[in-house]
Amino acid sequence: MATYNNLLLNLQNGILIITINRAEKLNALNIDTIKEIKNAIQEVYEDEGIKGAILTGAGMKAFVAGADISEIAELSEVNARSFAERGQEIFSMIERCNKPVIAAVNGFALGGGCELAMACHIRIASDNAKFGQPEVNLGIIPGYGGTQRLTQLIGKGKAMELMMTGDMVSATDALALGLANHVVLQEELMAKCMEVMDKILGKAPLAIGLVIECVNAVFNKDENGYQTEANSFARCCNSEDFIEGTNAFLEKRKPEFKGI
């Protein structure tokens, strides 16, 4: 694996735990950290030994408390556009990854941190987690896809309210809104993430990747999601995993999927 200054990477039984390691800055996303996240996700794409990834933040206070304000303060209209587009591209890599990516939200997930969590396929939060897009307090708006993903996840009305007021929501409220999938005690957070990931990794890898692709197609205006689903279903039926899965069911045994 590559060397990282702002991330800690730990591969456990095929699960890559990516920890943003800037606890003294509440794991704020500066430009260098964003670049390292891109490199780490590229490793998830390319390394066959990595079956899924869990993203989290160092320390007990924050997943990611936002972007680095000192860097944002220096932006002009011209470089702000490329700043946003670069972040959107990297977060889209996470969203489109054909391997499961879970956000372990251990505290504040604000601004870019909330956007990073929303780019992951599943969000599991500790009971002290806080979610929000407070960019309006700085005279700006979310730039890493927050206006789009928050609306997709919780609906137009509530997304409008949260982004226009800058209010935070608790882990419990995030669960009720559909922003979080599960809420657990902080000391149980990683165990819950591992539990969910292990359950996913016990299924057919090809099918899991195609579920991700088809769900993402719902939000792609240029794509016919139903056709994507039909094509993906057909692709599954041409796989060895399909033969193994159906045979295992009929023979009343646990399937042994190979991802082919």
Image (cartoon, rainbow, N blue to C red):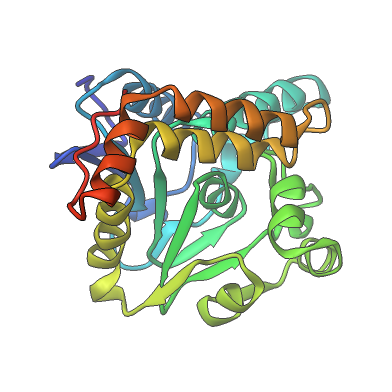
Residue at image x 37%, y 33%?
242
Residue 227 in the figure: left or right of residue 174:
right
The reply to whether residue 95 is in sight is: no
Residue at image x 57%, y 55%?
114
- Provide residue 149's location: percent of width, then percent of height: 69, 49
Residue at image x 77%, y 48%?
147
Residue 144 in the figure: left or right of residue 29:
right
Toward the viewer: 188 or 65? 188
Toward the viewer: 190 or 79? 190
Whether residue 212 is situated above or below residue 172 in the rendered picture: above
Toward the viewer: 52 or 209? 209
- Provide residue 227's location: percent of width, then percent of height: 72, 29
- Image quarter hosting the C terminus: top left
- Provide residue 247's location: percent of width, then percent of height: 27, 41
The reply to whether residue 250 is in sight is: yes
Residue located farthest toward the front when viewing the structure as drawn:
250
Toward the viewer: 48 or 204? 204
Whether residue 227 is situated above or below residue 10 in the rendered picture: above
